[in-house]
Image (tube, rainbow, N blue to C red):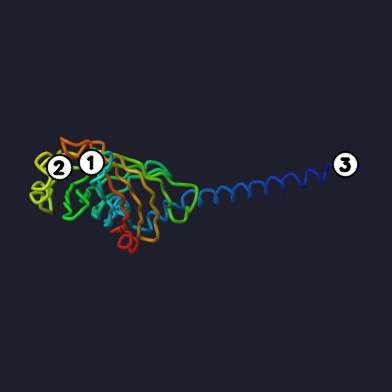
Amino acid sequence: MIDNKTENIKMRVPKIIILVLVITQVGFVTFSQENSKDTIIFSALNKSKLQFFLDDTYFFGGIATTGIYYSNNFRDLKYTNGFVLGIEQYFPLSGKVFLSTGINISQRNFIHLKKSPNIRINNLYLDVPVTTAFELPILRNLDFRLILGANIGFRTNSTIKGDYHLILENNPDVFIYNKNDFHRIDFGWIFGLSAEYKNFIFRFRSYSGFVKLDNKDQGMLNSFNFEIGYFLFRSFNNKK
């Protein structure tokens, strides 16, 4: 009886070893296929590193509400409209964190002396923002991200629309803005939210300056932007 059991075990052992070897081989092949899948897909896409880099290049435009905050003359100031245009590029730092930078043309305007005649001051800046976008745990299918960063701006032009002379005739002591007293460089921080849908990006961004605009006043510029952008090369590269 014992000999029969021993004989059956001896007959089963080679079969078990063969089965284990087959399962191991199949598992190894499956693992190798999964492990090389990304490489195969990458090769099939026939994309260069430059094309993958350009996938995250986007052009955008937007409208802004702009004004002066923390000014000594806050009672005579009012927010008004402006605009922003630019091109930027994402640089992935990790799976959920991206660095973004580029060149923006931004208009940061405000109204002085709200009573008629209004004095409107327009300021045009060449901005270089550097921001970090953090993926949030909600709306992941829309790449919902929190934006934090800084911006340095170079004022390229300022215009004052309105007649200060009429006001000075009635009140010679009134404070007036003179563009010759405006600082050339602006620096501040950016806070916002963004989301993506297909090749489009939608953003709300707020900018608050740390440098006072006028030497004679403590006020600094800020803006609230709504922006829509388009990833320029994603559709083109995906056809390759």
Residue 207: percent from the left, percent from the top?
30, 44
Q: CA distance from mark 1 to mark 3?
A: 106 Å
Q: Quadrant of the N terminus?
A: top right
Secondary structure, mark 2, is: loop
Earlier residue among tags 3 and 2: 3
Q: Which residue is mark 1?
A: 73
Residue at label 3?
A: 3
Residue at x 69%, y 45% (from the top left corner) = 17
> Where's residue 108, x and y in %?
22, 49
As helix, strand or loop, the secondary structure at mark 3 comes to helix
Give the residue type at disc 1: Asn
> What residue is at 9 percent from the left and 41 percent from the top?
180
> What residue is shown at x 32% (from left), y 52% (from top)?
56
Neighbor class of circle 3 (other Cα within 10 Å; few <14, some 14-19, many 20+) is: few
Q: Is residue 20 left or right of residue 149?
A: right
Find the residue positioned furthest to the bottom.
Answer: 239
For the C terminus, give its image quadrant. bottom left
Considering depth in this image, is 83 or 50 the residue closer to the camera?
A: 83
The residue type indicated by label 2 comes to: Val
Pointer 2: what residue?
A: 174
Q: Nearer the viewer, residue 211 or 177?
A: 177
**Front one among 6 and 186:** 186
Gap in angstroms between the C-alphas marked 3 and 2: 116 Å
- CA gap between label 1 and label 2 equals 10 Å
Give coordinates of residue 13: x percent, y percent: 74, 44
Give the amino acid at mark 3.
Asp
Give yes or no for contact between labels 1 and 3 (Cβ–Cβ under 8 Å).
no
Q: Callout 2: 10 Å neighbours few (<14), some, many (20+)?
A: few
- Residue at the right extreme, as displayed: 1
